[in-house]
Image: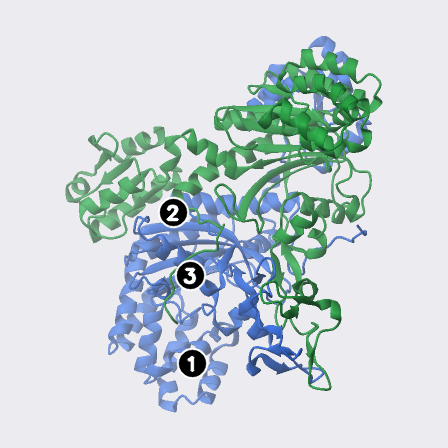
Chain colours: A blue, B green
């Protein structure tokens, strides 16, 4: 075997112990809050049938799916064969295309693809969840509150903060129309980010309000065009949005009616926005329905003393083709960074797999973005890095034998502890403790063994003390 | 979009909430013990470069790797082109093979494969770990004690208990020759299975003892042949093993010398086996070295009061080409099932990636097998199924508003709790609690609101009691 310089595929990452400890701190916090609210875990396979995934993420999404080559002779059933005249043949002329560079004719990979790959890697957690709900509908207790924390894979061009393998942490409630679910999602968001010490702003909107605005400005058929422009308000301000709409052919009258709404985008007080919307959308039943939903949610939130501010942002549109009611987006308050978390209500997630008219609402936490924010703001507690609490120095065979039962005792009390496995220079062993950020070292040499005591060294202060076994255990457990 | 009957690729699994809770119970126990012994977590990407994986698992293993199709036009740089005469050409004649069924010539997939796939899914955790150690050697603190709990993928033929996606839980210590590491692995095994309530037997052997036996029977060059036969002792007994060796051409004299060793396979007392081996292997330095290692390990174990019996089994050979010293295998005591856990010492894991002469020792826990054993023996605690502790019945809008702050208070105290999100019939709501195995239900209707009290229903006994808010909290926290 020839020597290989080791590397990993671009866009993927190894996680070192320190990174893992920080990541687990995030995952553990998220998981704990999900459980506190009664969400139950599921997991789905990394590989799904391509028929489950294709067509669910748009044409661009189809391209970004990682496809898995069929096992064995994947060309066995394919379309390249030598005919009776000894010539190589493609099954049909459509399978030939021109090579973009040389101009030579070659086999079209799009024709070959479905013959050689039937499975793909999960692109998100939502489509596999919809597939799961339909496939297991008879075993599921509805309303079904599930959480799912798993990696997903996308063949995106890798860049800073964008990876080809990353984790999503999703919760969804499926089979319930109640707005209590929306309230609960906001509570979950607040509890998680408060727990992590990340200050966030929760932004709400409702697809029905956006539909109402499209109606009252006289452009009910152009909701998507309208919201794509509205979505830029936060970045560009009012004028460029108006210019863009004009360019898209929105009538002057429509734009004039829209202008007062644009003023709202910087207004965050529900008590100001809602009465305004009630008046301006009074001719739109769907718009009024959306206002009613937001009012009900904000009414519940008033009693709950959340830490994070909740704002109504009528320019918020994310994934509009997908959401049918509430839209939620969470942004870091102290650092410019895309959204940390987003979601909303959808009315027909499972329809494509054969289960109609089941409403759901859900939200997805981006662990990588949260990690980046916490790293940037230095929000990880120092203590989590000390994965081992105490290292026993190795002074040789007799001491090893003396220390092993003591170590077993510490572990029995739940104290992560280890002995340096080799008899090495003291300096090397203390270096090991320092590099692993182990806060305490125990020295049990000849003298200590004779006296039945142990020397404990505090690696932060350098202080040493001689303790009995009971004193040592007590000291370590109280740390 | 056409309607699809949802399914998942064969050999893969969805995990329901109940299965997840049980699986997490196993993973949490394993992870906790790993941490208690000072092992630190790492993770590696699901996808590795095929150059990292190929050739590491034998020819059969190469076939069982899941390969990922290159993104975009994967045929762009491939070998099928139309030439200047308009004929389709393969790059070279070796790329043509006969179709096994029709006899027609077709493109050899093995020639096309490296042109269209450069990545594969992780096949185990060991090779990615070796790659990790070499790639990050300058950041790592040696001896490096790492744990890794991640799924692996193999395109094996699916059958009962064998899946195409399954989890491995590995620990390894790399960069230390000390036998303390072996002792510690056995302690880890004992603590994990004791924690899970699974009775196991730990079997030990040493590659050096096997080499010694091959030497003293006069067949030093046929170690692999010898051990492949020896490995069958447990299943078949002595006679078939002797017959097989005879068939393989082992001399009568060799077999005669071997027979007394075969008698040892059913003998489990170290104090009987070791003196016998010391005598019979006295002319083999490597054999004596192996005995010395086992003696040292068993000497340490004597002081540690392990729950699980540790046996020396000289027929144990697993993965011989790989291990160079200690070999460990763990079997369930109460149920016939393959090994639950196995490992050993290897002296050159990282050599192929360019880091020579680094010794390591490690062990891998098979979570799926452990799950199957625990399910069969009914060893999962009932309580873990109750993921939510209390459900508030939904009596309508006013009651919802009354209950939400109470729920927030319970969650603040760490009690997983939920409210049924819809105003539905009481029976439906209680059914939901029963199906989700929620042990308590709170009824807070008009009367309760008026009196400032809450009715708590114990779903196991059916008992109901009226409590103040403080009493309720206390009752739930003490459960």
Along the line of sight, which residue is nearer the eye, A31 or B5?
Answer: B5
The one nearer the camera, A260 or A325, is A325
- Rendering coords of residue A360 (x, y %): 34, 59
N-terminal of the pair, mark 3 or mark 2, is 2
Q: Which residue is mark 3?
A: A343
Helix, strand or loop at label 1? It is: helix
Q: Where is mark 1, residue-wise?
A: A225
Label 2 CA crowd tier, 10 Å (few <14, some 14–19, many 20+)? many
Q: CA distance from mark 3 to mark 2?
A: 16 Å
Q: Is residue A161 visible?
A: no
Task: Kindly identify which residue carries mark 2.
Answer: A39
Which of the 4 image quarters holds residue A460?
Answer: top right
| Alpha-carbon span between mark 3 and mark 1 | 21 Å
Label pair 3/1, CB-CB below 8 angstroms: no
Please tell me in which quadrant of the rendered image residue B330 appears: top right
Q: Residue at x 73, y 37 (%)?
A: B321
Which one is closest to the eye, mark 1 or mark 2?
A: 2
Query: Do pointers 1 and 2 mark residues of a single chain?
Result: yes
Dot label at residue B321: none
Q: Quadrant of the C terminus of chain A?
A: top right
Above or below, B308 against B174 in this view is above
Where does the image place residue A146, in percent across and percent down from the top left? Answer: 39, 50
Q: Secondary structure at mark 2?
A: loop
């Amino acid at each position: 075997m020839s020597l290989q310089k080791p590397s990993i595929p671009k866009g993927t990452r190894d996680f070192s112990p320190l990174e893992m400890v920080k990541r687990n701190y995030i995952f553990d916090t998220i998981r704990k809050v999900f459980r506190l609210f009664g969400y139950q875990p599921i997991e789905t396979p990394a590989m799904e049938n391509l028929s489950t995934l294709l067509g669910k993420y748009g044409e661009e999404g189809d391209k970004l799916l990682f496809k898995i080559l069929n096992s064995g002779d994947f060309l066995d059933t394919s379309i390249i064969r030598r005919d009776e005249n000894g010539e190589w043949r493609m099954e049909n002329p459509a399978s030939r295309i021109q090579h973009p560079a040389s101009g030579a004719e070659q086999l079209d990979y799009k024709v070959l693809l479905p013959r050689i790959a039937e499975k793909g890697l999960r692109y998100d957690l939502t489509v596999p969840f919809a597939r799961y709900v339909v496939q297991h509908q008879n075993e599921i207790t509805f309303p079904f509150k599930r959480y799912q924390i798993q990696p997903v894979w996308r063949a995106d061009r890798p860049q800073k903060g964008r990876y080809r393998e990353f984790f999503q942490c999703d919760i969804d409630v499926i089979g319930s129309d109640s707005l209590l679910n929306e309230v609960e999602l906001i509570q979950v968001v607040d509890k998680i980010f408060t727990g992590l010490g990340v200050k966030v702003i929760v932004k709400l909107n409702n697809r029905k309000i956006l539909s109402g605005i499209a109606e009252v400005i006289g452009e009910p058929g152009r909701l998507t065009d309208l919201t794509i422009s509205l979505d830029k308000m936060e970045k560009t301000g009012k004028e460029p949005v108006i210019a863009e709409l004009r360019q898209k052919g929105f009538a002057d009258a429509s734009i004039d009616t829209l202008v007062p709404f644009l003023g709202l985008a910087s207004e965050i007080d529900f008590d100001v926005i809602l009465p305004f919307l009630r008046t301006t959308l009074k001719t739109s039943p769907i718009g009024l329905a959306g206002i009613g939903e937001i009012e009900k949610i904000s009414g519940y939130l008033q009693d709950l003393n959340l830490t994070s501010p909740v704002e109504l942002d009528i320019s918020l549109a994310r994934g509009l083709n997908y959401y049918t009611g509430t839209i939620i987006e969470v942004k870091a308050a102290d650092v410019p960074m895309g959204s940390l978390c987003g979601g909303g209500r959808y009315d027909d997630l499972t329809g494509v797999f054969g289960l109609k008219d089941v409403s759901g609402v859900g939200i997805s936490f981006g662990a990588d973005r949260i990690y980046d924010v916490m790293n940037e703001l230095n929000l990880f507690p120092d203590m989590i890095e000390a994965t081992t609490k105490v290292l026993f120095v190795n002074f040789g065979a007799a001491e090893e034998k003396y220390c092993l039962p003591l170590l077993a005792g510490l572990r029995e009390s739940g104290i992560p502890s280890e002995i340096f496995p080799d008899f090495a220079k003291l300096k090397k062993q203390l270096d090991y403790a320092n590099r692993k950020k182990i806060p305490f070292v125990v020295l049990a040499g000849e003298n200590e063994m004779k006296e039945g005591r142990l020397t404990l060294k505090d690696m932060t202060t350098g202080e040493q003390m001689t303790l009995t076994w009971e004193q040592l255990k007590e000291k370590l457990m109280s740390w």
